[in-house]
Amino acid sequence: MSILAAKWWPLIWLQCRYASAMVAGASCQEADFLAMQFLQMTSSLNPEPHSSVKPWDVNYYIGVTYHKSGTHLMMQVWNLTFGALGAMPVDMGRWSQPCYPGFCYTPDAPIQLWFNLYSPEKAQESRSEAAARGLRGLRVAGFVRDPVSMIVSAYCYHHRGKEPWNLVENPHNIVTHMGPSEGLTFLGERMLPKVKNMTDVFAHPANDTLRLDYEKTTASSDGFDSEVKKLIDFFFQGFISDEEKALVLNATQMADLSRHPLVETEHSNDDDCEARTREYVPTMPADLLAQYRSFQKRLGYAPL
């Protein structure tokens, strides 16, 4: 892919997502799948071969997510980052737990996006996988969010009827019929394994793992740029030029909600819902709440 094509691909990608979602009423996952198909078609218009060595020829890259808004943010930053560097659909894979029909693909790709499953055990398996592939090493990054905010946000999201297909967090749209106290307890229990994994991985990240701050990234454009620059340096130092770093940063800025608030609509909750729901956090079962307070402490968040 030429530099010119790489520069324009992020715009094409987002336009495809918007069009497919609005015209067909597609879910975020369906729109993303359509965008990848669109990329396959447009990439054939730019048949230049890859440069001799790409970063993913050397390292195994995994983006990890654990929470809804962070997942949406990571999906966009991930695709925009690697798309700007010329990654093709065959280079990029996706894995989720559970793996819904049509959602997971290209398990052997060197650039992976993993949803709700990365743990210390998976980290060790991934390091072994990188070695087995003859790669130099593993590079992992993920957006970390306040664990209590995660369940508050999840309640408001599912309570308004989102993702009735989600067998873990909202089976048969059950959260729609729950009040805040019941809903927080239900989601706190259902989300406990992945919140524990997030905490175990990122409380003290390994040298091959980068913790990105969700709150800082979404608070302002300066915060967004600061976190993305950390990601670019961590992933690509020594692999790409300063010009290419600037190209990647410019591409990812399309995912910045401060610059482009219309990018995020499906996963944005009403602030009043989250404020009201947060008042019910102390009503959670004591043992369950204690675990979430422990997660907050380990990750450096003050209990709210």
Image (cartoon, helix red, strand yellow):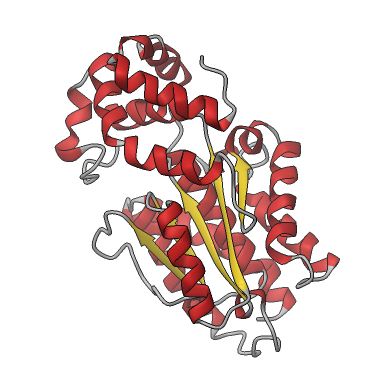
Q: Which image quarter: residue 5? A: bottom right
Question: Where does the N terminus fall, quadrant-wise?
Answer: bottom right
Q: Nearer the viewer, residue 19 or 29?
A: 29
Q: Residue furthest right?
A: 242
Question: Quadrant location of residue 81?
Answer: bottom right
Where residue 289 sits: x, y (%)?
36, 19
Q: Please report the residue visible at 68 percent of the width from the left and 58 percent of the height from the top.
A: 251
Picture residue at 62% right of the left edge, 59% below the top: 208
Residue at (35% x, 25% y) in the render = 156
224 with respect to 146 (left or right): right
Whether residue 54 is visible, yes or no, is: yes
Front residue of this view, candidates 222 and 123 = 123
Looking at the image, which residue is at 22% across and 28% down?
A: 175
Confirm whether residue 11 shows in the render: no
Residue 198 coordinates in the image, percent (x, y):
46, 42
Q: Is residue 91 left or right of residue 99?
A: right
Residue 163 image position (x, y, % from top left): 27, 42
- Count the numbered circles shown: 0
Percent coordinates x, y for residue 268 in the rendering: 46, 33
